[in-house]
Image: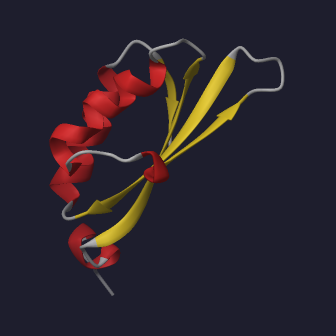
């Protein structure tokens, strides 16, 4: 069975984006600024934050309604190019 990426995801769908980086005052805003042009305005209930045990790093889980593989690729590309982002799932 050979499915395209579009068929695997069944768009539109709820999609979590996990982003890790150093805990800075503006990390959340930087991540939101990258995602919002592709998903629309994000609300606080779409974002979950978790600080590392030593407080140096933060992980954000941003839940969006994904509408296409191209949208997800654009978001991932923007996040990967961001120097503040250490890791992306």
Residue 58: x %, y % from top left: 63, 26
Say which quarter of the image contains residue 63: bottom left
- With respect to residue 68, does 40 lie above or below? above
Is 2 displayed left or right of 40 in the figure? right
Q: Name the outermost residue toward the front.
A: 44
| Residue in view at x 75 percent, y 27 percent | 52
Q: Is residue 89 above or below residue 1?
A: above
Tell me which residue sits at (60%, 34%) in the image.
59
Disc count in the image?
Answer: 0
- For image coordinates 26% across by 68% down, the residue present is 5
Say which quadrant the N terminus sits in: bottom left
Please tell me which residue lies in front, 10 or 26.
26
Foreground: 88 or 56? 56
Place of residue 7 in the rendered image (x, y in percent of width and height, measured from the top left): 25, 79
Is residue 21 left or right of 79 when viewed as pictured? right
Spot occupied by residue 87 in the image (x, y as percentages of width and height): 53, 29
Q: Residue furthest right?
A: 53
x 52%, y 13%: residue = 25
Tell which of 40 and 18 is nearer to you. 40
Quadrant of the image occupied by residue 75: top left
Image location (x, y in percent) of residue 47: 49, 46
Q: Tell me the colour scheme of the image.
A: secondary structure
51 relative to 23, above or below: below
Q: Is residue 14 left or right of residue 53?
A: left
Name the one closer to the observer, 80 or 36. Answer: 36
Residue 13, located in which quarter of the rendered image? bottom left
């Amino acid at each position: 069975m050979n499915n395209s990426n579009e068929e695997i995801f069944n768009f539109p769908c709820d999609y979590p984006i996990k982003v890790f980086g150093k805990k800075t005052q503006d990390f959340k805003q930087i991540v939101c600024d990258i995602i919002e042009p592709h998903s629309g305005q994000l609300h606080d209930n779409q974002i979950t934050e978790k600080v590392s045990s030593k407080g140096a790093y933060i992980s954000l889980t941003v839940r969006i309604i994904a509408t296409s593989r191209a949208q997800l690729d654009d978001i991932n590309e923007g996040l990967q190019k961001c120097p503040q982002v250490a890791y992306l799932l």
